[in-house]
Amino acid sequence: MTKNHRNESPQVKRVCILGSTGSIGVSTLDVIARHPDRYLVVGLSANSRIEALFQQCLVHKPAFVSVTKENDARTLSEQLIKAGLEVDVLVGEEGLIQMAESDQSDYVMAAIVGAAGLRPTLAAAQAGKRVLLANKESLVMAGRLFMDAVFENGAELLPIDSEHNAIFQCLPKPSVNGRSDFFNSGVRKILLTASGGPFLNTPVEELSSVTVKQACAHPNWDMGRKISVDSATMMNKGLELIEACWLFDAKPEQVQVVIHPESIVHSMVDYIDGSVLAQLGNPDMRTPIAYGLSWPDRIDSGVPALDLFSQHKLTFSVPDLERFPCLRLAYEAMESGGSAPAVLNAANEEAVAAFLAEQIRFDQIPSITEQVLNAHQCNEVSSISQVLELDKHARHEANQFIKALS
C-alpha cells in the first residue's frame, strides 16, 4: 500500500473506517460525504456484508479495503476489477492492522464491534493517528496498555460513543493524548446517562421470556444486534462505565450512571462549584462523529436541530442493579481492575451470542457472565498477548456454562 490515493489537498484529512458497513461506519460516510473539501475516504472494511462494501467502494473509491475471509476477498476483487476500480483488497485481522497503521490515512474510525476491534484499533494508536473510538472493547480489555500507546505515540483519542463524546464536550480543556487531570480541575463527578433500554419498566419476572426480537428493539437508537442486546441488559452501559474510567482517568465511584429514557441529554459533568454541564441533542450518532472528525472545530453533521419545545419532559432516575445485574458486574470488574474487565467482556460476548442463537434465555446472560467472573483469578495485564489469552480462556469457560444450560 505505497501508492498515493488521488491528488488530494494537504488540508484534506484522509480517513480509514474499520467497520464501514455497520451503523457507525454508514453514519461516518454520510458525514464525510457532506464535506468533500475536508475529508477523503482511503480505507474501508467489512466482516460479511461484501455487497454493501462493494457499493461503498463504487461511491467513495478507497485505496484499500479489508474483509474477513479469503473467498470474500476474491469475490470483491473480481467485482472491483469489473467496475474499473483500482483497490487493494486485504484479508483478515492482519489486513485490518495494515489498514489501521498505513501512512495513507490521518484518521481511523474504529467501529468494529467487540474484541475483534482491539488489535487494529491499538495499531492505529501506535501509528500516531487520530483514533475516533467507537470500539469500547479496546479500553475495556486493555485500558492501561491502550492509553499508554496513545500517549507514547502522539496519537489523538476522540471518543465517539455519544455519552463519552458528550462528557468530552463538557470537560475543562479536554485531553486527546491519553493524559488528563480533570478531578483536580474542578470536576466532582461524571454523570453517564443511559436510556434503560426496552425493558426499563418490564416486570423482572417477565425477563426470562424475552425474545431476540424484543431485545433488539431499542426505543431510541438504531444499532446492531449485539449492541442492542447489551443495551437491553445494560451491559453496554457497564462497558461504557469502564471506558469512561480510562478515557477520563476516573475511579468507578466518580462515574454515576443515570437513567434518562428520552436520550436527549447524552451525559453530564458535575463540578465542585455546583455547576452541572450537559450536552443535549437528538439521538443521532452523526453528531459525535462530526465532532470527532472536526475537533476542535464543528461542522454540519446532517442532524436536525433539537426542538426543545417538543420535549415535554426530561426524566432522570437511579438504575436498579437488581433489574440490571450486568451494570453491577461492570462496576465490580472495574473496581477489581487488572484482567477482570477483559474477562467480563469475553464472557458477555459469548453469552449474548448464545442468546441471539436462542441457546439460552435473556436472563441467563448476566448469570453466565457472573459465573465466569467468579471463577477468574484477577491479575495485572502487561501485554496484548496476555489480554488475548485471557479473552480466549474466558470464552471457553463461558461456553462450558452455556453448554450446561442448553
Image (tube, grey):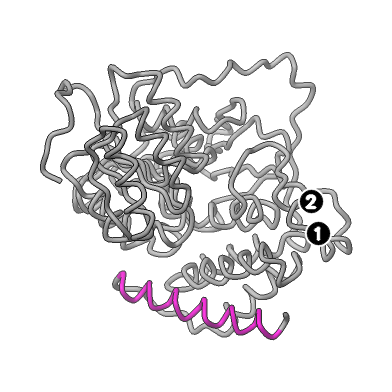
Q: Residue at x 31, y 33 (%)?
A: 83
* SS assignment for the magenta stretch, majority: helix
- The image quadrant of residue 172 is top left
Circle 1 crowding by C-alpha within 10 Å: few under 14, some 14–19, many from 20 = some
Give the labeled residue for mark 1: 210
Whether pointer 2 and pointer 1 mark residues with C-beta atoms closer than 8 Å, the reply is yes
Q: Nearer the viewer, residue 315 or 271?
A: 315
Q: Secondary structure at mark 2?
A: helix
Q: Which residues are magenta?
A: 384-404
The label shown at residue 199 is 2
Marks 2 and 1, the one that precedes in the sequence: 2
**Closer mark to the observer between disc 2 and disc 1:** 1
The location of residue 220, given as percent across then percent down, is 69, 36
Between residues 379 and 219, which one lies in front from this camera angle? 219
Q: Is residue 230 left or right of residue 155?
A: right
In the rendered image, residue 304, in percent from the top left (x then y), is placed at 58, 17
Could you tell me how far apart the alpha carbons at marks 2 and 1 are, in whole angstroms? 9 Å
Residue at the image point whose x is 49% and y is 43% from the top:
22
Q: Residue 284, relative to residue 223: is it above or below?
A: above
Depth order, front residue of 307/174: 307
Q: Which disc is residue 381 wearing?
A: none
Q: Amino acid at mark 2?
A: Phe
Which of 241 and 119 lies nearest the eye of the viewer? Answer: 119
Q: Is residue 394 magenta?
A: yes
Q: Position of residue 250 (x, y in %)?
A: 46, 53
Q: Amino acid at mark 1?
A: Val
- Asked whether, in this view, residue 162 is left or right of residue 368, the answer is left
Question: Residue at position x 52%, y 40% from top?
Answer: 23
In this view, 49 is above or below 367? above
Figure disc tally: 2
